[in-house]
Amino acid sequence: MTETDTEYDDIEVVVLSDDDVREAIKNALASAGCTWEELQAQAAEGRFASHHAREAWFVVATLDPTTA
């Protein structure tokens, strides 16, 4: 075992189901207070209405890159 192996032994990886991903996206949009379409428009303009909207975009784009 190398030093690198032991360095990451405490990391836990959680694989999300499709339902989990949809729920996370739904929660992110609710937190941002906007619809998916509104969030897309904000991202296209590069100007988000709030910090929550910017975070929601990060979550949605990270969890489902096909929606970005």
Image: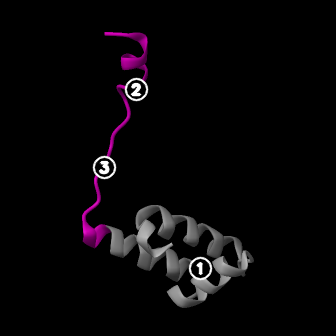
Compared to 9, does 56 lie above or below? below
Measuring from the top left, give residue 53's x and y in whole percent: 63, 76
Going by the numbered disc 1, the residue's amino acid type is: Ala
Q: Is 48 situated left or right of 19 in this image?
A: right
Query: Could you tell me which secondary element the residue under label 1 belongs to?
Result: helix
Q: Nearer the viewer, residue 28 or 36?
A: 36
Q: What is the C-alpha distance between the residues marked 3 and 1?
A: 24 Å
> Does the CB distance between marks 3 and 1 fall below 8 Å?
no
Disc 3 marks a residue whose amino acid type is: Val
Between 68 and 52, the one lying in front of the other is 68
> Would you say residue 67 sits in the magenta stretch?
no
Where residue 60 appears, as percent x and y from the top left, is 48, 70
What residue sits 29% from the left and 59% below the top? Answer: 16
Was residue 7 drawn as part of the magenta stretch in this picture?
A: yes
Count the labels in the image.
3
In the picture, the disc for residue 8 is 2
State which region is magenta: 1-20
Residue named by callout 1: 32
Q: Quadrant of residue 45?
A: bottom right
Left or right: 51 in relation to 20:
right
The image quadrant where one finds the N terminus is: top left
Q: As shown in the figure, which amino acid type bears the numbered disc 2?
A: Tyr
Q: Give the residue displayed 41% in from the left and 68% down from the top.
A: 64
3D distance between C-alphas at marks 2 and 3: 15 Å
- Name the residue beneath numbered marker 3: 14
